[in-house]
Image: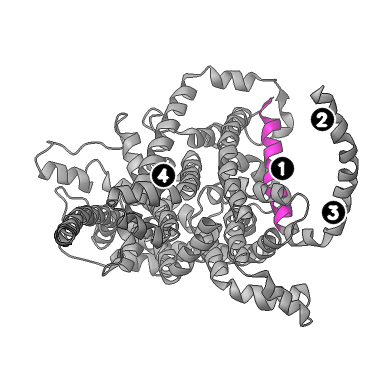
């Protein structure tokens, strides 16, 4: 009963709404001109590639870019991926890489932002220095750290030997056990400044009166942080963590330049693996199927991203 | 009366002691983070002023015995082939980044303005579609874009990179700028309109000057993104005279991986332009994030 009445209610409203929509679009036709350049560029460079990737993922492709000779093979690419050992190895690596990098970079960045919140001499300079790793190219960062980790002349190895902790300098990025953590350290080095900037910006929006009121009420530093500062930063934190997670999920340069995914796939993550499949072994179909799977995962993350952002939007509308 | 007078200072003293604990913890933490951040960069600089022989020693020379600028001279000397290549890569990077920056401001400003001011149907959908671009990894776009660029005849030209970089800089640019425009009172524009300005004039003369910091921040963001980009440049460019710095340096030193001083010098020089640019203009960037991204 209720459903029926609901429909009966809805139908008469739908009709004017639709013609209203067209009229709205027509009335606002000039407004679209402002957005048009952005949309056109996006369509060329985004919509078309996505469509093409999905199409290719169902085809067996010859090596080289003679893609006219591709043959349809249904979901073979997908089953081949999901049954291979490499896939699960790479997926595990990607999870470790993404979660560890995101979490540690966020915590370090947030803590740095809190420590920098109070004014002191040299604060501006310190902040500037801390941001530099985020600004310099990941290629440069990879080479700097590759040199630091060098198995014969690396500075960390030399320090460890000098302190008498080991006899020989350890192989940080040439051994299966240590390569991923070593790369994560580099990634965090590059990314914590981003979390720091975001959280510093967020901290400025926490009203001083509230903190002072909490002090008057006898709250200690931790209580002030937990009950006043942190709730205010919930939205910024969500956005920052999501942006970091997406960036980490999509990282390529650091593993690619420092190890190329080796040794024996220990530092391959999804993106480097896909790149190798496509441009190294020229298996475009399989690489595309990988991309589509990746895409599905990212859309799930994207759902939360948009929800976090539109949460902000709604609050803005209410204010 | 007397009890209050007695307890108050003691409370204060205790609170101060506790706050100091946190403050000291914060200081120690900052020192640790400073070392983590700065030591790798210092080691890069120290290595870059060693000779190839001095760099390859164990235990290492903590401070170079005979500091030399030979690596830098080699990279900057247009007479020898290394310098020629390096300077050409540098110029290519500069060209691509500058064109990208200019175009992305031209495209992002009107789009952000529309998202901020107009409520046309599909506005929210388009806005989030633009933001979603951030979610997709470059690899998804590589093959199709490579084919597209070949179709357009842009492979091995800087314009293939400009077109690509434009799109991945746009989402955050639009988002930041929208935040800026949201904070400019619409009454200012209305006043201008009443005084006889067209919407476009009001936009150029009222909104643009007020949002200069946002536009500068957007420009820095685009420039740094384009300057540091690697994966598309690595795929789209094959000719040696078209390479940008990140790819050029990689090609260059994967051939002779033992020249670590040269590699460190090149890494340093590649970082200088973006770091200087960022440090000079960082207050705009932080402000843009505060007003654009966070307050929202």
- Determine the image quadrant of residue A213: bottom left
Q: Quadrant of the C terminus of chain A?
A: bottom right
**Which quadrant would residue A107 be assigned to in this image?**
top left
Q: Are marks 1 and 3 on the same chain?
A: yes
Q: Residues within 10 Å of mark 2 (few under 14, many from 20)?
A: few
Residue bearing the label numbered 3: A24
Element assignment for label 4: helix
The chain carrying label 2 is A
Is label 1 in a helix, a strand or a loop? helix
Q: Residue pushed farthest left?
A: A164
Is A52 part of what is drawn in magenta? yes
Mark seen at residue A6: 2
Structural distance between the alpha carbons of marks 4 and 3: 48 Å
Relative placement, left or right, of A22 versus B187 is: right
The chain carrying label 1 is A
| Residue assigned mark 1 | A48
Q: Position of residue A161 (x, y in %)?
A: 13, 41
User: Does the CB distance between marks 4 and 3 fall below 8 Å?
Assistant: no
- Real-space CA distance between mark 4 and mark 1, rounded to the nearest whole angstrom: 28 Å
Q: Chain of mark 3?
A: A
- Mark 4 or mark 1: which comes first in sequence? 1
- The answer, for residue A136, to whether it is visible in the render is no
Find the distance from the CA under tag 1 to the CA under tag 2. Answer: 40 Å
Q: Depth-wise, is mark 3 or mark 2 nearer the camera?
A: 2
State the residue at coordinates (47%, 19%): A85
The part of the chain drawn in magenta is A38-60
The first of marks 4 and 3 along the sequence is 3
> Residue A27 magenta-drawn?
no
Residue B8 vs residue A123, the one in the foreground: B8
Count every numbered label the image shows and give the total.
4
Of the numbered discs 1 and 3, the one sitting upstream in the chain is 3
Residues indicated by labels 4 and 1 sit on the same polypeptide chain: yes
């Amino acid at each position: 009963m209720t459903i029926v009445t609901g429909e009966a209610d809805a139908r008469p409203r739908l009709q004017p709404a639709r013609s209203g929509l067209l009229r709205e679009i027509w009335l606002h036709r000039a407004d679209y001109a402002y957005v048009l350049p952005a949309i056109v560029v996006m369509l060329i460079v985004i919509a078309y590639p996505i469509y093409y990737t999905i199409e290719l993922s169902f085809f067996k492709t010859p090596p080289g870019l003679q893609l006219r000779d591709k043959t349809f093979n249904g979901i073979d690419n997908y089953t081949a991926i999901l049954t291979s050992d490499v896939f699960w190895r790479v997926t595990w690596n990607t999870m470790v890489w993404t979660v560890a990098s995101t979490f540690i970079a966020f915590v370090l960045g947030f803590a740095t932002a809190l420590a920098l919140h109070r004014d002191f001499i040299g604060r501006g300079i310190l902040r500037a220095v801390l941001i530099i790793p985020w600004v310099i190219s990941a290629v440069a960062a990879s080479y700097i750290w590759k040199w630091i980790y060098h198995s014969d002349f690396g500075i960390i190895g030399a320090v460890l030997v000098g302190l008498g902790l080991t006899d020989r300098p350890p192989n940080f990025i040439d051994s299966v056990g240590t390569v991923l953590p070593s790369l994560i350290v580099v990634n965090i080095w590059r990314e914590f400044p981003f979390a720091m900037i975001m959280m510093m910006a967020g901290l400025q929006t926490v009203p001083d009166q509230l903190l002072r009121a909490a002090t008057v009420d006898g709250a200690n530093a931790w209580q002030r942080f937990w009950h006043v500062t942190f709730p205010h930063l919930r939205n910024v934190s969500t956005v920052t963590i999501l942006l970091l997670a997406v960036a980490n999920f999509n990282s390529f340069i650091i593993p690619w330049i420092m190890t190329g995914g080796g040794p024996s796939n220990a530092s391959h993550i999804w993106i480097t693996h896909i790149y190798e499949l496509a441009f190294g072994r020229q298996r475009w179909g399989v690489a595309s199927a990988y991309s589509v799977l990746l895409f599905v995962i990212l859309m799930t993350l994207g759902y939360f991203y948009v929800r976090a952002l539109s949460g902000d939007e709604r609050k803005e509308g209410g204010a | 009366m007397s009890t209050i007078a007695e307890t108050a200072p003691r409370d204060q003293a205790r609170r101060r002691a506790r706050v100091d604990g946190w403050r000291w913890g914060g200081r120690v933490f900052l020192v640790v983070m400073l070392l983590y951040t700065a030591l790798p960069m210092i080691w890069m600089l120290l290595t870059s002023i060693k000779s190839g022989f001095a760099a390859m020693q164990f235990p290492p020379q903590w401070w170079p015995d005979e500091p030399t600028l030979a690596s830098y001279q080699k990279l900057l000397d247009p007479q020898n082939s290394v310098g020629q290549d390096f300077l050409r890569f540098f110029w290519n990077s500069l060209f691509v980044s500058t064109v990208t920056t200019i175009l992305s401001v031209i495209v992002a400003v009107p789009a952000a303005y529309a998202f901020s001011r107009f409520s046309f149907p599909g506005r929210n959908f388009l806005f989030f579609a633009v933001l979603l671009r951030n979610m997709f990894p470059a690899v998804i776009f590589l093959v199709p874009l490579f084919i597209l660029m070949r179709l357009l005849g842009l492979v091995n030209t800087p314009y293939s990179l400009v077109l690509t970089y434009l799109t991945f800089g746009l989402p955050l640019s639009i988002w930041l700028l929208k935040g800026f425009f949201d904070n400019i009172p619409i009454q200012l524009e209305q006043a201008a309109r009443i005084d006889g300005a067209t919407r476009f004039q009001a936009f150029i003369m009222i909104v643009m000057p007020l949002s200069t910091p946002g536009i500068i921040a957007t420009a820095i963001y685009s420039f740094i993104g384009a300057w540091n980009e690697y994966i598309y440049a690595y795929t789209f460019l094959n000719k040696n005279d078209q390479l940008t710095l990140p790819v050029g340096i990689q090609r260059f030193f994967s051939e002779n991986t033992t020249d670590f001083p040269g590699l460190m010098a090149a890494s340093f020089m590649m970082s200088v332009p973006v770091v200087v640019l960022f440090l000079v203009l960082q207050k705009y960037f932080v402000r843009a994030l505060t007003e654009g991204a966070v307050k929202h």
